Image (cartoon, grey):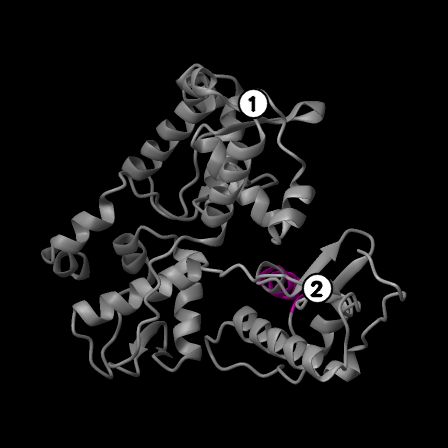
Amino acid sequence: MSQKEPPRQITVPEMAPHVHSFAAGENKVIKISKWLIKWISYSLESGKIKPYDMLPSKADLAFHIGVSKSTMQSVFRYVEDCGYIESKQKIGTYIKDMINGYKLKKLTSKRELAVEAIKRHMTEYGYKEGDLLISTRKIAQLTGMSNATIRAALGSLISLGIVGKKYNSFIVLASSFESDGIVTKTLAEKVADSIKEFILNNLKPGDKLPPNSELASRLNVSPKTIHDASKLLARQGVIISRRGRYGTIVLGQTEQNRAEAYSYEKAEQKIRHYITQNCEVGDKLPSIKQIAVQLGLSPKTIKRALDNIADEGYLTFSRGRYGGTFVTDIPQEGADAYKWLAINSDYITNIEN
């Protein structure tokens, strides 16, 4: 952060965060994020704030808006990925310089992709005003997305007045609407492509990738997004992450073939298959030791595979006497699942009965 004057601390009262009322089912994160982006843009243009001014703490804003700190954390992450702010550990969150050559990276989140998928589903099956949508889980099955992503997308559609909530179901409020035409990649996928381009132009097999914080600054995204992009590249065999001083290493073709055969990836595939074939949402998986014995692998390898599956929203961990690993969503097997569902219209009838 380089500026001639010390950063000014923006106060909550001058931001006037009057966004504390939310409609039933409305997505709080999206509503607050849009308000914050609009406030930053207007305040920069009018000269009320300057680049590098510090925002109030997440806790203070959350208290005045009337939401949880975790909700405010999600808001800051969303706005940071949109390029308006940047958070520094032990320093705070400051306004980014939007004028001096900074280009915004278009964010296409999983939620936005899910919104478009639901719109397409409503159009293809001729929903009319007053019709009830199929369940969240059925939509997730059709689109190959997690239940959590679909719920977030439905919250956005409620905010847009396209769907509404009726008891425990969702009802169509508008049968005609414009599509955003989103067919692009998520932000993590875009950043993964940018990292691959950086590797191609600057590194060779065996070289160490720069730290996440450095890549985040270079690509103007949050470290969390770099983390998500790195996980995608690791699965593609482009890089491999080691703990401690070894860091993240660029793989060559030979090393890539070895990486693809790593035990934890095989374990992940087998666990996914087991969940798909044998489990329902809420079921408890066998212990890590039991799975390790069954697959002939180390508990450490099984833990890593479970962590990867949990990061995608399919598992959750609980401690205590009645704790364990629980299924929160069912993975879709095969990349052509959505394509198959799209051309088999009878599937909708079957799953609704």
- Which residue is rendered at x = 54% and y = 75% of the image? 31
Q: What x and y, as percent, mark residue 129?
A: 24, 84
Quarter of the rendering containing residue 182: bottom left
Above or below, comparing residue 10 to residue 345 in the picture: below
Q: Alpha-carbon distance for marks 2 and 1?
A: 41 Å
Q: Does dot 1 land on a helix, a strand or a loop?
A: helix
**Disc number lying in front (2 or 1):** 2
Instruction: Locate residue 44: give its quadrant.
Output: bottom right
Q: Is residue 55 visible?
A: yes
Give the position of the C terminus as an image quadrant: bottom left
| Mark 2 element type | loop
The foreground one among 11 and 24 is 11
Q: Is residue 88 above or below residue 272?
A: below
User: Residue drawn 36% across and 52% down?
Assistant: 145
The question of residue 264 being in magenta is answered with no
Q: Which residues are magenta?
A: 68-78
Q: Which is more N-terminal, label 1 or label 2?
A: 2
Residue drawn where x is 24% and y is 50% of the image? 338
Q: Position of residue 195 (x, y in %)?
A: 53, 40
Task: Please identify the dominant SS of the magenta region.
Answer: helix
Let me know if residue 66 appears in the view.
Answer: no
| In-image side of 180 versus 29 (left or right) | left
Q: Is residue 158 left or right of residue 342?
A: right
In the rendered image, which quarter is residue 51 located in?
bottom right
The residue nearer to you, when weighing 258 against 274, is: 258
Q: Which residue is mark 1?
A: 300
Q: Which residue is mark 2?
A: 96
Circle 1 residues within 10 Å: few <14, some 14–19, many ≥20? few
**Which x, y percent locates residue 243?**
65, 26
The amino acid at mark 2 is Lys
Residue 185 in the image: state x and y as whole percent.
40, 53
